[in-house]
Image (tube, rainbow, N blue to C red):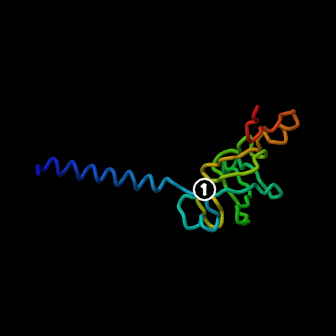
Amino acid sequence: MKPKLILGIIAIIAFTSLLLYNFGESISTYTDFEKAETMKSAHVPGTWESERDYGFSRETMQFSFYMKDESGEVKKVIYSKPKPNNFEQADRLVVIGEMRNDVFYANEMLMKCPSKYNATDAESYGAQPVAAGIQGK
């Protein structure tokens, strides 16, 4: 075989391997705080603990709050950005970041706010449920 062909095949294999490795690293599944301690980047879903202290620090330029994960563990979360506008309305949060010294440092945060289109709302406006079958003539 020609040396250019061999070099091209090796380059394609190396590029494909690097691409697959980076893709595998970027895919993250939801986890809890305990498992997040062993990961360099984790997605942790949970709910905001509104009874505990929270707020934005002008000194550190960080927003901090407490969150309960799906296994019931509560940890302090430090978010590196200001508090999102709809933070108090969110009924579920997903923080993306890493655990350090029993504190979760989030660089991204996703919020799921309650829907304004619930089944009970549709019924209160007179909407009728759709029949499962088609009525014959």
Which sits in the foreground, 5 or 127? 127
Decide if residue 129 is on the left or right side of residue 27: right
- Indicate the position of residue 25 as horizontal and vertical percent values: 47, 56
- Indicate the position of residue 49 as horizontal and vertical percent values: 78, 57
Which sits in the foreground, 94 or 119? 119
- Hey, which residue is sitting farthest left in the picture? 2
Residue annotated with mark 1: 43
Q: Quadrant of residue 51?
A: bottom right
At numbered mark 1, what does the secondary structure look like: helix, strand or loop? strand
Instruction: Give the residue at x 60% y 56%.
Output: 43
Residue type, label 1: His
Q: Quadrant of residue 86?
A: top right
- Hey, which residue is sitting farthest front in the picture? 137
Position above or below: 129 against 66:
above
Decide if residue 32 is on the left or right side of residue 1: right
Which sits in the foreground, 101 or 12? 12
Instruction: Give the residue at x 60% y 51%.
Output: 107
